[in-house]
Amino acid sequence: MRRWTNFIIDNALLFLILGVIVSALCTLFLKNLNIEAFPDPSPPVIEIVTIYPGRSAEEVERQITVPLEISLAGMRGLHRINSISLYGLSDIKCTFSYDVPYIQARQEVINRLSTVVLPDNTSPQIIPNPMGEVMRYVLVGSRDLMELRTLQDWVVARYLKTAEGVEDVSSYGGFIKAYVVEVKPENLIKYKISLSDVIQAITNANVNVGGRAIDFGSQYFLIRGLGLIRDLKDIENVVVAYRNNTPVLIKDIGQVRIDNIPRTGIVGLNRYDDVVMGIVVLRRDAKSIPSIRSIKEKIEELNSHILPKDVKVFPFYERGKLIDTVIHKVSEIAFVGIILVFISIFVFIGDIRVAFLVALTVPMSLVIALGIMALRGESANFLSIAAIDFGIIADIPLLFVENYLRNTREYGAGRRSLLQSTQEVGWLLVLSVLLVGICFIPVFLMEGAEKRIFAPMVRTYLYAIGASIAITFTFLIAALALFVKPKSDEMRLVKLLERLYDRVIEKLVKIKGRWIAMYLIGLCLVSFLILKNLGLEFIPKMDEGNIYMRIIFPYSISLSQTYQNAKKVRDILLSFSEIKTVEFQVGRPEDGTDPTGPFNSEYFIDLKPYSEWKRFKDKAVLEEAIRKKVRELFPNADINISQYIQDNLDEVMTGVKGENAVKIFGDNLYKLDKLADEVEEKLKKVEGVEDVGVFREIGQPNLVIEADRERLAAYGLSVEQLMDTVSAALGGKEATQVIEGDKRFSLLVILPEDLRQNPSKIGDIPIILPNGSYVSLSSVAKVYFTTGASFIYRENYKRYIPIKFSVVSKDLAGTVKKAQEEVKNVKLPEGYFMEWSGQFKSLVEALRRFTFSGVLALFILSAFLYILNRSVRNTLIAMSGVLFSLFGGAVSLFVANFPLSLSAIVGFVSILGISILNISFMMSAYKEHVLNGLSPVESAKRAAKEKFRAVLLSCFTASMGLLPTTLSKGVGSQIQKPLAVVVVGGMLISGGLILLVVPSLLRYTHVEER
């Protein structure tokens, strides 16, 4: 290292220029760095949707869901398979292990889908993961809702899919255009034509054919047979049959018009009751910033010259605004943190040039770290930057500079002092990177959601630490050699603190060993006592600056009534001045991308900046006020309040729309429903549990038309002919599709609405017999009402019923344990069992993994320290830094009233390395004095006095580096706060303990002769 230091000093100007060039190049790389608002903690999830029109939940489960589950079973890395079967729709989510790449998981699913055999006219489709939603927009203009929906489906959605990173664009709301043939039953009787004949005639009348090419003389002609339906007139002139040598046309038996397919969902925005909405979804791991930029460019092109002049695309939600907020907040935190580091250094060192140079290494290290991430194609996020302690990054150059300034008093400024400093602390500083890396082993060994959240932060942190080491032994040494001259005087504050410490240390080094042992044992016991009573939570909820509310009404409610209820809720929400935008949606989109029913209503609530709020002190109070007002209006509705991204994440993690869920597994839906009621009542009694609700599976009113096969055979009818009539009469039967340019629209055959809306007339619907006569529907089928399944939930091939709930207390683990105690008395029949999922399950699994990885890290850390010290005693003294950090962090969490979370645990890990490094510095100085012939007591005194300023400055600066993060509020600040509190308080307290306790321990240090 002496040779390297001499080389740097001899070429100091060159290394200064090189440091500036490297920093400038990395700054240029930053334009390619992608920044996400928050890390995506979800595993690879492939969602398959299959539309099976007009079929009940039981029929969908039997014909679609179960065959698909069988086909998808046994895929490599498949962790869990969840399915929902409901009226006309099957939704299956395949959740893979985190180590399976998304592309590979998707391809595996595609391969399996190609082998499954399903009923005719059903085709399973893979839909994008909702975690990729980055924008919601509406089409505004003077056109009607059908025209706007047509433009959305066939122009806007298609064009936006060409934007970078976009996987899909979903449509919601408005009316989907369709060609409709409304057949008059009396005309069917008059012309003795069955409904099946009408459907078949329309199908046969809509076809193009191709023939072989033919030569006419020297010309080569292609043969095309054109028979596609082009407009309403073509449909009207379709020949259905001949009666008395006269063709019977469609217009003779019914009316042809342009209408819409039956609506399954409605969307409103603020005071606009009915709008057309689009949702843009990115591919998994697509870069948000360039993708959003590309989407905005496409929208600008649509609005400027592609869409009609009176139609515009208006985005009302985009994740880009959240990212901009995050970038602004991170920049503010970084700036304030670096300023505080500079002030701290200046206060303790007293030289503004030295303080500036050391503080300069922080932005240089950070820029280089981010440049490396940009080159490697990694993404940064709020946590990975805001949770980095700029003070800890500055500790490495700071400890070197402090040692250099101390040496200048003896050797003078320049080469000799720099060489002496690199010899004394250089190897320890280099090894500190390895030391910090070992401490982060538990984070590297994390799995699941916690790894996706914290691994980017640790990578950024280690990049910055590595850059700090490189800058210290190149740029900083060169700058010290060229610019820094030692000052003869010190800051008065430092002198005062050193004098006070000199008095204390005289007594501290004389404390007997048994008292030290008792003190350490006491620290250990107090630490564990505090941690035990803090409470446990998985990860603090990140504030997204919005609210996402779901209200579920009784399952028998109609779509139109839910819509009326939703407008009332909208009016309540807009009465709050803190709310900027309310988008509400009821039912589900026609493409089946949201597996729910007409009873479901959802509300995206965008909030004004918190600085503009007047009535409520924070979002939690506003949420409670909203819940109270909605509850007064709809006391029996199931209300759930979350956030936009969080809501999608909860559904991915639990398989249902809820933060946590109790799942009761069994086969009988009626038994499951009864058991769920018992569990729901018990959960409502638990303090700290809110938003309890059962996802009902029974209670869907059904109108059943059951074929009487004997009577059908007697009349010469087939079941298909009967079902064609039923389908057309009650829902509309798609006969074919009409192609308009590059657009396709369904052609539906229906019966008059009065037959469909009046239950008493359904049995009178005429069924045409082969001989031309007719009978009523009730003559060949049983018509009755019954109650059946509305939803059928399955997980890993077994039925279950979910009971969702949220935990509003800070102690997630304690609250759920109380709930488990309350629920354990529910008696389950044989073959039935219960499972808890959601954040609690993730917390339990994470703590189990962390226990193993933490023990492993402590073992490796102990082995590493033993290799360095070659003494068990020295290793134990150095490892006392673990206890000091644990005590300091625990006290900090207790004072701040924060529960223990994974974020706080990562904070503990962050400060271990610096604490152990500071103790190692004191031990190194102690050994040097002993080898120079001083007694153990005198050596301990001198080592403590010499390293007092270094330890104090190191810990204080590390605390100041994260102080802005600790004090930050608003969007995104919650998840890193426990980490910051542990670092800020833990470094101050552990630093004080090191200065007060370690000098007494130094007397027991083993010193080897040179």
Image (spheres, helix red, strand yellow):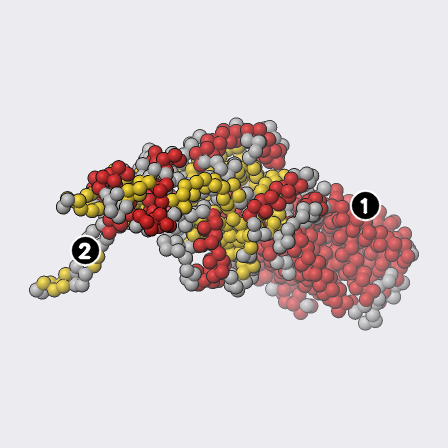
Q: Nearer the viewer, residue 619 or 42?
A: 42
Q: Residue at x 43, y 43 (%)?
A: 704
Residue 653, given in percent of the width and then of the height, sits at: 57, 51
Is residue 568 shown to the viewer in this render?
Answer: yes
Q: Quadrant of residue 940?
A: bottom right
Q: Is residue 1 above or below residue 682?
A: below
- Residue 441 pos. (x, y %): 67, 61
Disc number for residue 297: none
Residue 815 sits in quarter: top right
Q: Number of labelled discs? A: 2
Query: On screen, 188 above or below 520?
Result: above
Q: Which residue position holds label 1? A: 496
Where does the N terminus fall, quadrant-wise? Answer: bottom right
Residue denoted by label 2: 225
Q: Secondary structure at mark 1?
A: helix
The amino acid type, in three-letter code, at marker 2 is Gly
Q: CA distance from mark 1 to mark 2?
A: 101 Å
User: Badges 1 and 2: C-beta atoms under 8 Å apart?
Assistant: no
What secondary structure is marked by label 2? strand
Q: Is residue 802 left or right of residue 785?
A: right
834 relative position to 656: left or right? right
Residue type marked 1: Leu
- Looking at the image, which residue is at 87% across and 49% down? 503
Q: Residues within 10 Å of mark 2 (few under 14, many from 20)?
A: few
Residue 932 image position (x, y, % from top left): 85, 66
